[in-house]
Image: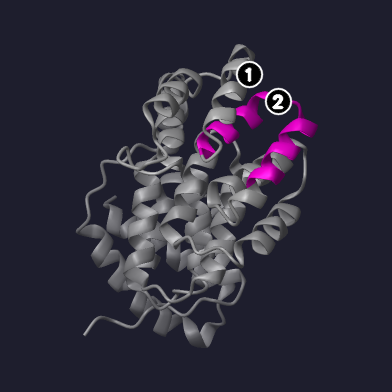
Amino acid sequence: MNSGLSVYSQLNAILSVHVQAPNRKRLRARCSLLSARQGSRTSARHPLHTILAMAPIRFEFRSLDRMEYFMSIDGPPTSRLVTPTVRRVVEKTAQTVDVENLHLLRGAISQHPASIALRLLLAELETEQNANTILDDAHTVFRNNPAIIAAKVKLAEARGECKEVLIQMISSMMNNSTADRKVWLKEAIYAEKFDYPSTAKAVVKVTLQTSLDVTANTVVTEIDESESQRTFRTTRALLRSAMPIYYKSLAVWVRALEWDQRHANGRDSKSLTTFVVKHGCFALPDPPE
């Protein structure tokens, strides 16, 4: 069975169950556009079970992800905050979470108090109470910095707070932030890479709800970028949050159908298209001009 036919069959089955009969003919006619578009696309992405089988390989690259993340927090290498000392300390302490780095980080922060990366690395090694104090102080000094806000939410997730609390935390702190959407979605991607999936989903949901002035093409680019990073929970959260907003976009529907093909494995509970249809947002996009 070709990929176009399987996409059509999947969406057709969803519509047959969840959409009133008078609407089915119109919706089926429009979804044939999706199957034609899907049939012309070739996908070389790994299915989810293959990615899970590669978990040991992903773990080997965790230290590289950490290094990349913490080195980017204070800005590009040319930034005045990234002094040779700060760079050297971050390179030494970012690769692994090691309590032996506590003394080194404390000394470096006293000499370079403007470095956010050093404060976040120290918070990782401290007790929960001390970490809260460090992050609160950092939030006071560097008001509305996305990396600090994300770190506070990660700490709440580690403490066992539910997703609704995490969303509320991000919403309250994100209101006055001047950081753009790209920075917040980067925080979501790295949150998942560092095993904070609830933080990643909460950041995505709040970001898409508060920045509605972007085009569907931008959202599709963000979805593709997240999936290329193999952060699949973030990708699904992007699709789930985007579909009720950009339901007229053919490209967003195509991405959702592709996701269902690769990852839902026929389970309605995991299907993005089923979720959207059940919640009343079942109007397929108009045909292109």
Q: Which SS type dominates the magenta stretch?
A: helix
- For label 1, the SS is helix
> Helix, strand or loop at disc 2?
loop
Q: Which residues are magenta?
A: 115-138
Q: How is the image coloured?
A: one colour
82 vs 170, left or right, is: left
The amino acid pointed to by label 1 is Leu
Q: CA distance from mark 2 to mark 1?
A: 8 Å
Q: What is the x, y in percent for residue 90? A: 46, 26
Vertical order, 14 against 89 (above or below) = below
Q: x, y (%) of residue 8?
A: 36, 64
Residue reaching furthest bottom?
A: 22
Residue displayed at 76% across by 31% down: 130
Does any portion of residue 193 appear in the rendered image? yes
Packing grade of label 1 (10 A; few <14, some 14-19, many >=20) is some
Q: Which residue is mark 1?
A: 102
Q: Give the residue type that dot 2 points to.
A: Glu
Classify residue 74 by image quadrant. top left
Earlier-in-chain disc, 2 versus 1: 1
Q: Of all residues shown, which one is farthest toward the top?
A: 100
Disc 2 vs disc 1: Cβ atoms closer than 8 Å? yes
Which circle, 2 or 1, is nearer the viewer? 1
Residue 149 counted in the magenta span: no
Q: Could you tell me if residue 17 is visible in this image?
A: no
- For disc 2, the marked residue is 126
Q: Which residue corresponds to the image point at 35% horizontal and 56% vertical from the top-left?
A: 6
Q: Is residue 55 above or below residue 135?
A: above
Q: Quadrant of the C terminus?
A: bottom left
- Other-residue count near label 2 (Cα within 10 Å), few / some / many at <14 / 14–19 / ≥20: some
User: How far across and how far down the image is residue 127, in percent?
Assistant: 76, 26
User: Residue at point 53% right, 55% down?
Assistant: 237
Residue 12 coordinates in the image, percent (x, y): 44, 68
